[in-house]
Amino acid sequence: MRHEYKSGTFCMDIQCPHHKVLEAVAWDEYLAKKRDHCKDCYAWKFFLWLKEKDWRILRPIPDISSKELAARLKGLDPVKVEHLTEDEILCL
């Protein structure tokens, strides 16, 4: 199931005291005020860093073994390389 981001979700989850000021404003004004009110918030800094680098967080992946992760990083079928170690897979 795909969930779209709603502005302020994280702020509401952690009960940020700065969010009350931002709840009733439009998106452009929200961003302008957020830059001022949340300039010391590490979550906001991370969001801005992601935007600056043109990165997106798509979705979390379920816990997988390090061997399967190594295979996926190399674009290999994890089943076909299950007899190899992580180092061997990464050297392919």
Image (cartoon, helix red, strand yellow):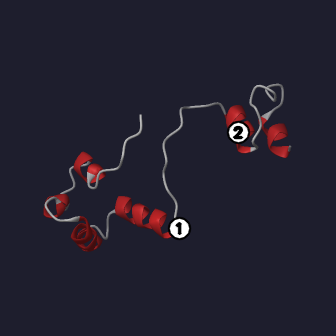
Q: Nearer the viewer, residue 66 or 60?
A: 60
Q: Secondary structure at mark 2?
A: helix
- Amino acid type, label 1: Lys
Quarter holding the N terminus is top left
Quadrant position of residue 71: top right
Check whether the beta carbons of the residues at disc 2 and disc 1 lie within 8 A of each other: no
Q: In the image, residue 64 lies at what x, y percent?
A: 61, 31
From the viewer's perspective, is 66 left or right of 56? right
Above or below, 10 against 78 in this view is below
Picture coordinates of residue 78, whole percent (x, y): 74, 30
Q: Quadrant of the C terminus?
A: top right
Depth check: give the residue in front, 27 or 45. 27
Q: Which residue is mark 1?
A: 53
Q: Amino acid at mark 2?
A: Arg
The residue drawn where x is 25% and y is 65% is 27
Q: Quadrant of residue 18?
A: bottom left
The Cα–Cα distance between marks 2 and 1, rounded to whole angstroms, is 24 Å
In this view, 60 is above or below 42: above
For label 2, the residue is 72
Q: Which residue sits at x=28%, y=49%?
A: 9
Residue 83 at x, y percent in the picture: 83, 25
Q: Is residue 34 above or below residue 92?
A: below
- Local crowd at mark 1 within 10 Å, few (<14), some, or many (≥20)? few
